[in-house]
Amino acid sequence: MKKNLCLLIGVLIMNVTAVANSKLIDMLPFLEEKIKKGHEQFKVPGFAIAFIEGDQIQYMKGFGVRAHGQEEPITTETLFQIGSVTKGMSATLMARLISEGVLSYDDKIIKHFPDFKYCDEEHTQNLTIKDVLSQRSGLPAYAGDVDIQAGKHFQDVLPTLQHLTPIAPLKEKFSYQNVLYCVPGQVAEKILKKDMNSLFQEKFFNLIGFKNASLGINALNASNNKALSHKVGTTFTRILPYSEFGYRIPYAGGINMSIEDLAKYAQLHMNKGKINGQTYIPENIIDELHKVQIDTTGTEPYRYTKNFYPKDRVKNTGYGLGWRIYDWNGHKAIGHGGFVNGQVAMVSFLPEHKIGIAVLANAATPLGVIIRSYLFDRHLGLNDIDWLDRAKIIKARDKAASAKNAKHSHKKTPLKKEVGKKDLTAKPMPKKSPPKKRRIVKKD
């Protein structure tokens, strides 16, 4: 195998008329240097990155290889699993259908599925499409995911949600869901009498001009240009089988995409529902996707959100419709990540500054959020943090803390011995019993 894992495969796209006023073009040498260092630091077999500015995809490249130990390169058309980035796409599909008058954000689920039940009667009667898309259903977090992990499909798990106790009234608490997130899609299927694949192809993929996007494990396996999943350790890199978890909750995690398509998706949202001068979704409808529908501050369990970002960088977090919304040092930011076993996806942008990033990788890695952090900081003039160094420091600290905890959890404290005192740990010698007298039995 060729050793050059930093081989850059792809295309560099520049809008010649915009170069003179492009802050992004000026940043590219700095960003490419950080990308190269990050590739070496995290040992990701392959990944792809796109930068979007205004209504243009200014930069798009593939790096490395599709599979460890092989030579096929990542290109801008290589398919990846995008996991929960699918949620924003499902919300975008709903927004398109709303613009066509097919349904409404405020439609109650029971209007279309009278037999639908979850938690209790009050929740069931009032749950709307917007409640589901904004993760404010009142269900316990990740309800039903254990069954999905065990191999069940979301349609088989949905009936079990009626036996759960709500953790909050509707609209009052953020609670991340995967199984329930598929219900608005089912509503659309019922109204239009189309399956999921037809809905996405006809109402989303084809209209936006996606070239490689698909749904399901079969479509991924059929592709001749796909990234395999990997687990990367300090001394090893191992190819993993594709995770089918996301395909069992298809509206929450079942889409496959290339960086070309993911960049177009970011471009659509950065430009308020327009792409290539055409309006796909009216601005007032897509704005609902980008509004905070429920506050999430203090609810994020992930270590990187607690430790990685200084307090002034990421704060006031919320959830829109399929999008996470937060302040980046006082500037509104919108984005969403996706993770399946051995693959990572991310889209993030500053809507007021119209600058954004899309990333796909074939191993679990923080590389995407790190390059995003450099991009946002450099664009806003905040250049005081070296995010790659910060990642090293935090990783070393977390590793040391884990080792320390493991050591204490396995440490045994023996009883103390003192000179001149009886050894309490010694077992006393058993006393010998006197020999039993032998009984003589007389025979007749």
Image (spheres, rainbow, N blue to C red):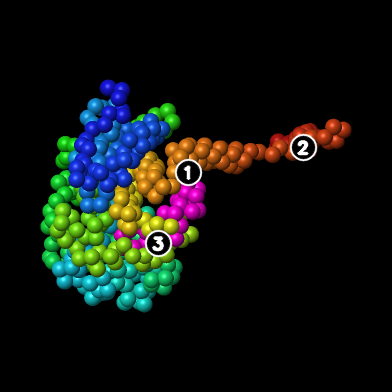
Q: Amino acid at mark 3?
A: Gly
Give yes or no for residue 17 being in the magenta stretch.
no
Residue at screen point 27% across, 73% down? 106
Q: CA distance from mark 1 to mark 2?
A: 53 Å
- Residue located beneath label 3 in the image: 318
**Which x, y percent locates residue 23?**
31, 45
Q: In the figure, is residue 353 to the left or right of 186?
A: right
Label 2 element class: loop
Q: Earlier in the sequence, mark 3 or mark 2?
A: 3
Instruction: Between residue 10 and residue 320, name the one nearer to us.
Output: 10
Instruction: Please say if 384 is above or below 176.
Output: above
Residue at screen point 18% across, 55% down? 275
> Does residue 270 show up?
yes
Label 1 element class: loop
Instruction: Between residue 375 and residue 319, name the one nearer to us.
Output: 375
Q: Amino acid at mark 2?
A: Lys
**Which x, y percent locates residue 429?**
78, 33
Camera-near label (1 vs 3) is 1
Instruction: Between residue 347 and residue 46, name the one nearer to us.
Output: 347
Residue at screen point 44% across, 54% down? 329
- In the image, which residues are magenta? 302-329
> Does residue 109 show up?
no
- Residue located beneath label 2 in the image: 416
Q: CA distance from mark 3 to mark 2?
A: 55 Å
Q: 10 Å neighbourhood of mark 2: few (<14), some, or many (≥20)?
A: few
- Residue located beneath label 1 in the image: 384
Q: Amino acid at mark 1?
A: Asp
Count of numbered circles in the view:
3
